[in-house]
Image (cartoon, rainbow, N blue to C red):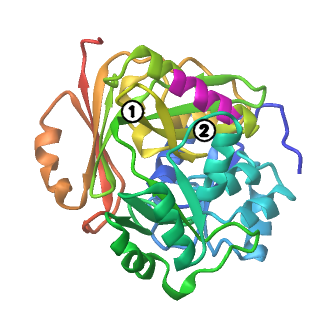
Amino acid sequence: MAGATAPLAPGATIGILGGGQLGRMLALAAAQFGYKTHVLCPEADSPASHVATNTTRAEYTDEKALAAFAKAVDVVTYEFENVPAATAAFLEKHTTVRPSWRALEIAQDRAKEKTFFTGIGVGTPPWRGVNTEAELARAVAEIGTPCVLKTARLGYDGKGQAKILKPQDTATAWAAIVGAKAKPHPDGGPFAVLEGFVNFACEISVIVARGVDGTVKAFEPAENVHTNHILDTSTVPARVDAGAIERAMAATSLAAAKLDLVGLLAVEFFVTKRGDILANEMAPRPHNSGHWTMDACATDQFQQMVRAVCGLPLVEPSRFANVTMKNLIGDDVNQLSAYLADPHAHVHLYGKAEARPGRKMGHVNVLRLQKG
């Protein structure tokens, strides 16, 4: 169904595919604008369900549930990119979906994602698509070591990855990540990709919003630090030169335009020691590295996404403070009392009852009020 261009009036319902913490924060932002939210996800007691107006618990492949969901909402969006593209395509026949299923399809497949970046003139680390152990061995010989093998789809926070530090590690990596499961995806894409390591100075990410009229507003880059493959901190301003910042923001805005995306697009970049930028991954949704915007910007990533998908005007997301976002992962939540006693620390918890290793329990934005 073609997307309507008129703004949605207060009282309309935003459908959210996915029930995680991003959906939770999106629902809270929607309520600020007077919108209702309806979450569809397979999990019980999801973080988003605690604050959404309504929740449907169903699998993303349940067409009966999807059809009823489409009738109950005025626009559909998603809070993570591993919703099947076929689900978004099905819903698009019944209601407005923003971003489109095509943007989702590209972002959830590493091979398509890297091909897309190359096609619009944005550099990436060296990579090869592989479907067999023999193809992997040839790719390792071409790219060199160290490198990393990743499943093309459904990987996040370090899941579905194995490092290859020397050619002899190839068989072990293949068995650990792919094993007997490897076969091309139905659309012909590779099951896995091999990526070469990049000698980078730092990692940054840029988030842009794009409205129904093509207007693009970009948040400035955050400098990201990962621990055990999971984002630990995002700091703004990023310690990179103005040229790299400008190129990263321009590349992200270009990607959003080429995808004809309506909503949010986040792109992670490596910044090399020479100041070049290389696109690593993208996500057509709110992003963990954008949580700093919730307390340091005139409008945050969730508010801007609501504006975009509902056809409201986008506003300049100007920053008024320096900030470091700290993820509370697993037992980090035990440090809560210290953050709560700090007037410059803004705590956001996700309503998860049990802290487990690697589980994101919340985040804290620590402001440094002298903007630099």
Relative to the observer, which residue lies in front, 95 or 199?
199
What is the quadrant of residue 184 in the picture? Answer: bottom right
From which residue to which does the magenta span run?
247-256
Q: Is residue 249 magenta?
A: yes
303 vs 63: above or below: above
Which mark is on residue 52?
Answer: none
Relative to the observer, which residue lies in front, 227 or 192?
192
What is the quadrant of residue 131 in the picture? Answer: bottom right
Q: Which residue is mark 1?
A: 272
Residue 349, how many percent across, how many down?
A: 32, 50
User: Quick check: marks 2 and 1 in contact, CB under 8 Å?
Assistant: no
Can residue 218 be seen from the camera position used here?
no
Q: Residue at x 12, y 46 (%)?
A: 337
Residue 217, how many percent across, how many down?
A: 60, 23
What is the quadrant of residue 65 in the picture? Answer: bottom right
Q: Residue at x 18, y 28 (%)?
A: 343
Question: Is tag 2's residue or tag 1's residue first in the polypeptide sequence?
Answer: 2
201 vs 158: above or below: above
Direction from residue 92 to residue 266 in the image, left or right: left
Direction from residue 338 to residue 23 in the image, left or right: right
Q: Is residue 196 magenta?
A: no
6 vs 268: above or below: above
Can residue 133 be seen from the camera position used here?
yes
Residue 227, how many percent across, how many down?
A: 26, 52
Q: Residue at x 41, y 67 (%)?
A: 159
* Mark 1 nearby-residue class (10 Å; few <14, some 14–19, many ≥20): some
Give the residue furthest to the bottom.
180
Q: Which residue is mark 2?
A: 264
* Mark 2 nearby-residue class (10 Å; few <14, some 14–19, many ≥20): many
Work out which quarter of the rendered image holds the C terminus and state it.
top left
Q: Amino acid at mark 2?
A: Leu
- Check disc 2 and report its element: helix, strand or loop: strand
